[in-house]
Amino acid sequence: MPYAHITGWGMSVPHKVLTNDDLSKLVDTNDEWIRDHTGIRQRYVAGENETTSSLGVEAAYKALMVAGLLPTDLELIICSTSTPEFVFPATACLIQDKLGATNAGAFDLLAACSGFIFALNMGAQAIRSGSAKTVLVIGSETLSRYVNWSDRNTCILFGDGAGAFILQASEQPGGVQGAVMHSDGSGGEFLSVPASGSAHPASEITIHTGMHFIQMDGKEVYRFATRVMGQATQEVVEKSGWKVEDLNLIIPHQANLRIIDAAARRLKLPMEKFMVNVDRYGNTSTASIPIATVEAVQNGRLKAGDKVVLVGFGAGLTWGALAVQWSGPLPSEHFVTAEWYKPWARVRSLFRRISHGVESIFSGRGE
Ligand code: COA
């Protein structure tokens, strides 16, 4: 059975930074309160032309560059997102088109902030089963579009961004060693966007009562998160035949510094074992773990051979963890890079759109 190695990684955030001081001009809050209660100093928010797919594409190109692959090498694209551009088509398909990943099937996965863990596990299983050799897993969010900017309980927490991993098959032992995934739908109301889905389609009432915005019972989510982070880490470590003391690094979902601190105390590990960057990005939901991973590699905190656990929790309720023996890029077989491929991908997409129109005329629809 082949092993699923993480051979490429990339991240992307919007241009605009929103500091705590900026937020204090929108709602009754202040920098000190936000830093004390969450550890967040700033977050990035998407501009008009920045979308869940555009951020995902940027992160994906960077991951392809690290892996030394072209978009045409991809066989599967999984985009984990809670803020898709449409109910359908899937954001993964928009990304597939923009990348020019002509050989890939693409679908979205929704498990809120645990989504990247779930998606990475699905990608790894596709490789382990032999159904794919090269998989792109993306976590991308534009949560700012679902945030009620007059609700100080939620608007201080969230940010936008994207992260991407390339998974590749190899006979060399390593890569994803084990995973656990959990859900408890009975806690769904603690963190939700009540309208926009088929239960409450858009209406005058849903708009006037703010049902299209993120709603959260912060205390319940906090209690749940501090309980499951340590539990899931312990569980995946045991499942992979490791010990918690063996871990070089834990990369947790970046929701709140206090939640990460509580997990560290539960696992009896020092905070130095945890990758933390929530101060600069806020909670970017499913993008937070890959963004933190990219920074861990860039800062030299994650090296080939290291044992690392990625652990997340979120709406659903969902939670999960993944144990990975970090590898790095496999030897590349290409002389051109994914970056060079970008203009061709744009032309290809345009050509496909034109040819759909031409086909429709010749098949009689244009009459
Ligand atoms: N600025 C200033 N004051 C604020 C505030 C803000 N943004 N938000 C709440 N307050 C006030 C409250 O009104 C309350 O005042 P009171 O004591 O006079 O009534 C006080 O601060 C304490 O509020 P509380 O809600 O008890 O704060 P908290 O310590 O529970 O922290 C969260 C709130 C949201 C930071 C915390 O509950 C949390 O992080 N929950 C988990 C959220 C999460 O991670 N969600 C995403 C999961 S993927």
Image (cartoon, helix red, strand yellow):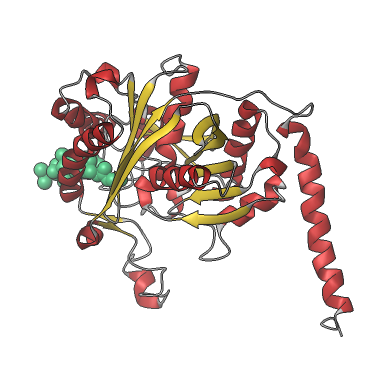
Give left or right: position of 255 versus 121. Answer: left
Residue 28 appears in the rendering: no
Q: Which residue is drawn at 14% across and 29% down?
A: 266
Q: Where ligand 1 lies, by quadrant? A: top left
Indicate the quadrant containing the C terminus: top left, top right, bottom left or bottom right: bottom right
Where residue 267 appears, x then y in whole percent? 17, 27
Can you name the residue that lies furthest to the right here?
362
Q: Residue at x 36, y 74 (%)?
A: 200
Viewer-proximal residue, 102 or 239? Answer: 239
Above or below — where is 154 with respect to 15? below
Viewer-proximal residue, 29 or 53? Answer: 53
Can you name the residue that lies furthest to the top here?
300
Viewer-proximal residue, 111 or 30? Answer: 111
Residue 184 appears in the rendering: yes
Question: Which image quarter: residue 180?
Answer: top left
Where residue 325 appears, x then y in whole percent? 41, 25
Give left or right: position of 63 versus 38. Answer: right
Above or below — where is 269 with respect to 8? above
Where residue 240 appears, x then y in whole percent? 31, 32
Where residue 119 appears, x then y in whole percent? 44, 47
Q: Which residue is drawn at 20% across and 62% down?
A: 186
How many discs mark residues in the rendered view?
0
Above or below — where is 89 with respect to 206? above
Viewer-proximal residue, 123 or 137? Answer: 123
Q: Residue at x 59, y 32 (%)?
A: 63
Give left or right: position of 158 versus 219. Answer: right
